[in-house]
Image: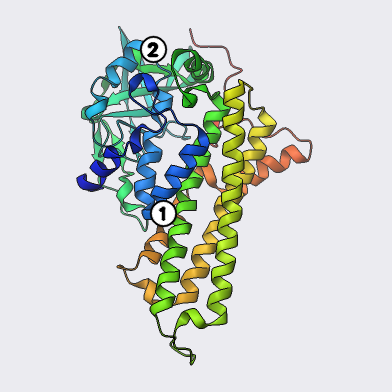
Amino acid sequence: MTHESLQALSDIGAFRLTLPIDFGGYALGARDVVEIVSEIGRGDGAAGWMVFVAGGLRNIISFPDEAVQEIFDDGQSWVGPLAAGASIFATKVGSARRVEGGWMVSGSWHFGSGCKHAKWIAVGVDYECAPGQTSRAMAILSAKQVTIIDNWHVMGMKATSSNSLTVDEEQFVPDRRFMDMREFPLRMDETRRRYSGLASKFGARGLMLLTNLTHMAIVLGMARGALECYVEMVKKQQPFNLPYPRVAEMASTQVCAGKAFAMIKMAEAVAYRNADILDRHAVEGIEITAEQEQAMTMEAVYATNSLDGVLSMLQISVGSTTANETNPVQRFARDVRVALLHGAVRLDPTAENFGRLLMGIDPFPMFAGGLPDRSKQAPAA
C-alpha cells in the first residue's frame, strides 16, 4: 500500500482497534471491529486486510512481558501494522533448533500479509521437543532478519503485500520471543488478567472466531461498496440492446439490486449476531464451547462465501464496462474472490467438519482450520 494510505489508516487508529489500552489501543469488542473493518473494506479490500493483519497483535501479547515490551517499544509512532504473520498454522513451516538462550530459526514462509510494512514478523516453526518428537512453535523475528520474496503477483488483493518470506541464513530468536503452540490457548487466557479492555477478555476460541469474523467483515464491506458503485453506474449508463433511457429503468437491474441488497443484509445479520455473542461471552466471562465454535464458524463461512454471488450478479448485470481496470466493481470482484481463497473461509472443508458433528461423528481436531490439534500431547520439556 502507498505510504499515504497507511498514514491515513494510522491517523484514524485503524491499526490499534484491538490493541490493549495498556499500549495505547482501543481494545474494542467484536461488534465494533466488524462494523469498522467492513466500513474500511467498503472503500478497499486491501485496506481492510491491513487492519485485519494488525489484529494479529492479539497473539503477540500472549508472549512474556519482556518480549511484549520489546515489540511495543515504538509502537505508538509506527505507521502501518506493527507485526505481520506468515505460515504460523500452515502444514509446512520453517524449523528451529535449540541453542544457548534461544533458538536458531531457518526456512521459508508464505502469505506474509503486511510484511512490507511491519516491524516484526511472526512465523511458524517445527522443532524437536523430545527425541524423535516434534512440536509446532511461533517465533517472532524482526523484519530485518527476513528477506521478502517478490512473488505476490495475483489477480486481487494486490496491495496486501502477502509475499513469501525466507531467511538467507539461520537467525537467532531469544527464548522470550519463542512459544510452543500448545501453550497458546493458556497464554491467551492469561492475557485476560494481564491487560485492560474488552478485546483482552476473549478466550482462545473467541479469538479464533473474531479472526474469522474480521475476515468476513472485509468481504461484507466490499460487497456493500460494489452495490453502491453499481447503483451509481446504472443511473448514468444507457443499455446496449434494450430501448430504456437508463440501465436503472430495466426491470432486470432493479431485481438484481434488490437481491444483492437482501444477500448483503443476510450476511450482515450473521456477522452482527456472532459478534454480539462473542462480546456477551467476553463481558460475562463465559467460555465459548467447542460446539458453539463449530456452528458459528460454519455460519460465518457460508455467509461470507454467499457474497461472491453478489459480485458476480452485479458484474454480469451491468456488463462489459466493469472489465475496465479503472472500474471499482471489477476490483471488488477480484479482491472478493481472492479473499475467499483463504483457507480459513473455504466452504467445503468447513461444511464437512461441521457435518461430522451433526452426524454424531467427532470433527477432525483442527486448530485454526489447518493445524492438527496437538494439545493433548505431552508438553515440551
Identified at 55% across, 51% down, the residue is 304
Left or right, 85 with reference to 202: left
Front one among 190 and 18: 18
Residue 347 horizontal/vertical position (percent)? 59, 49
Q: Determine whether 57 is above or below 354 in the image.
A: above
Local SS, label 1 = helix
| Residue found at the far bottom of this picture | 243
Image-quadrant location for residue 367: top right
Q: Which residue is mark 1?
A: 42
Please say if the residues under marks 2 and 1 sit with CB atoms less than 8 Å apart: no
Residue 127 visible to the viewer: yes
Residue 373 visible to the viewer: no
Residue 53 horizontal/vertical position (percent)? 38, 37
Q: Determine whether 371 is above or below 310 in the image.
A: above
Identified at 53% across, 16% down, the residue is 186
Marks 2 and 1: which is nearer the front? 1
Q: Which residue is mark 2?
A: 64
Identified at 47% across, 17% down, the residue is 191
Image-quadrant location for residue 147: top left
* Amino acid at pointer 2: Pro
Q: Determine whether 4 is above or below 244 in the image.
A: above
Q: Residues within 10 Å of mark 2 (few under 14, many from 20)?
A: some
* Amino acid at pointer 1: Arg
